[in-house]
Amino acid sequence: MRAGGGAGERRKPSEPRLAGPKLPAAAAAAREKPRRLRVTSVIMKPWISSLLLAWISILHCTWAEFFTSIGQMTDLIYAEKDLVQSLKEYIRAEEARLFKIKSWAEKMDILTSKSTSDPEGYLSHPVNAYKLVKRLNTDWPALENMVLQDSTTGFIANLTMQRQFFPTEEDETGAAKALMRLQDTYKLDPDTISKGDLPGTKYRSTLSADDSFGMGKTAYNDGDYYHTVLWMQQALKQHDDGEDAVTSKVEILDYLSYAVFQLGDIHRAVELTRRLISLDSSHERAGGNLRYFEKLLEEERLGKRLNKTSETQPATQGGIYERPPDYLPERDVYEALCRGEGIKLTPRRQKRLFCRYHDGNRTPQLLIAPFKEEDEWDSPHIVRYYDVLSDEEIERIKELAKPKLARATVRDPKTGVLTVANYRVSKSSWLEEGDDPVIAQLNRRMHYITGLSVKTAELLQVANYGMGGQYEPHFDFSRKGEQDAFKHLGTGNRVATFLNYMSDVEAGGATVFPDFGATIWPKKGTSVFWYNLFRSGEGDYRTRHAACPVLVGSKWVSNKWFHERGQEFLRPCGSTEVD
């Protein structure tokens, strides 16, 4: 029996049916329709801050997918600050208006107390009679206008204008998936994440029961029942611990019971559904599901439809459901290396690694000021260079790159078409020598260090990784059988990679090589270099590498890909295929 109740089977009218919580219409529509930018026409007010206008000018071309770049998410901080200031202005205006109304009410309360105690006596004074007429004809209508005065106009105009550049549901979903990716890669349980107990964090933040429920709903809407269970259990735990929440236990149990059934655990699904019904006996869907679950258990006991290896006995590890396998064959190795586990740097191999001063084979420009060079791995040879970029140069490169950042793409190996992919979560931009002297200077520096020509190299790529930002295991070079990704360049394959780390990362964000078990941690101002091709031009498949998810911090890198053409005399062919 398939989990989900055998949707393809014909049932009798009286047969119980299984139903889970419905997908929200927005989630269903998001799966089918491309996201569009909503533009709202708003009259610009003179009080709108210059900070807001600068923020909007930056976001005009880069509004999409904030979660893929921490660098661009910082702009949202300033946008929110501007909204808070606008809201405070509205509150001040509203308080001033209410103060006037309150003062008028108190004044009228005293006056009417006096006038109602002796109406004829009060009106016997001609001034009192005149003022009564005046109040009712002039003052009370003026008060009415004050009460009806709309002081929200400024704030609403500001909010409406900014809203078109706000993160969307796609961003919220991407951010939730990023937390789940960190949870999986670094083996963090939901309770640890919800309490904000992450290494290297300067600011602590927690997730409420409603936040945990939202995480579970995101997973559910994506058909990810494994994470649905983890986060709904966390939401239920927080609820049971007495935390205030808008979400009810009934709602949590509704999702949780259905998700555990989808993982094949009918016994627990029955237990959770019974608990749900004990809280809400009129829950129609839960009643139908319970009858369906109990029918399956009865059939199991009678041995009519389920055997001993059925889905009612899900794989668990320490009482927790096992994570389902996915498309990446080296997932376990890759994630272990990201955590700093499984590194195969044996003492024998370590003895073959050295530090030295590197003058680029006596390159004149490096003779006086050689670079510090450190071996990170012996075969394939990976080296790290220190003090390649100064802090000032890094800030200038980031300043140039930030307005141009766009979602990083990958090339489809079958079609050769560039497309976005969930396994690459970052934003990148490309900088030319003419953009700024610092780019030309860095290009020359990389040429001096490597001895390779930059004339046929690609532009400098700058990347900033977002929430859980990563690039799963991949090759930098084009393999046989793929569409020739670089044919239009006419410069051959990518012979080498020069990677500059432009930030320290508090936790995560390593560069790992699953094939031979190497982990290289980011160090600001340093660069790592390796060859992707043997001297014969054949690809070195050992160089399959990955950028691990950033757990805490903002990771900035830049890289230069050198190509084959122009290197014929700088890196001559070897005598064998693997030289």
Image (cartoon, helix red, strand yellow):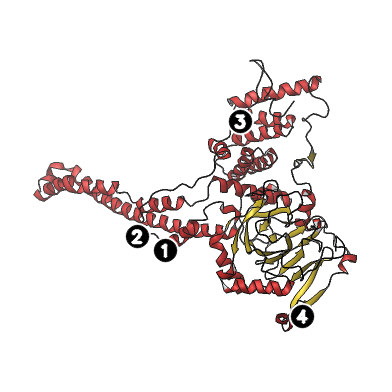
**Circle 3 sits in a helix, a strand or a loop, which is it?**
helix
The amino acid pointed to by label 4 is Arg
Mark 4 vs mark 3, CA separation in Å: 79 Å
Q: Which mark is residue 362?
A: 4
Question: Considering depth in this image, is 19 or 458 the residue closer to the camera?
Answer: 458
In the displayed structure, would residue 449 be above or below residue 489?
A: below
Q: Indicate the quadrant where residue 535 lies.
A: bottom right
Which mark sits nearer the N-terminus, 4 or 2?
Answer: 2
In the displayed structure, would residue 374 be above or below residue 25?
A: below
The spot of residue 274 in percent (x, y) is: 67, 28
Residue at position x 72%, y 32% in the image = 268
Which mark sits nearer the N-terminus, 4 or 3?
Answer: 3
Q: Quadrant of the N terminus?
A: top right
Question: Considering depth in this image, is 176 or 326 the residue closer to the camera?
Answer: 326
The amino acid pointed to by label 2 is Pro
| Tag nearer the camera, 2 or 3 | 2
Q: Mark 3 and 1 residues: CB-CB less than 8 Å, in contact? A: no
Mark 2 vs mark 1, CA separation in Å: 10 Å
Q: Which residue is mark 3?
A: 279
Question: Considering depth in this image, is 123 or 559 the residue closer to the camera?
Answer: 559
Q: Which residue is mark 1?
A: 50
Q: Is residue 484 left or right of residue 283?
A: right
The spot of residue 243 in percent (x, y) is: 60, 45
Which mark sits nearer the N-terminus, 1 or 4?
Answer: 1
Q: Which residue is mark 2?
A: 46
Q: Is residue 93 left or right of residue 573?
A: left
Which mark sits nearer the N-terminus, 2 or 3?
Answer: 2
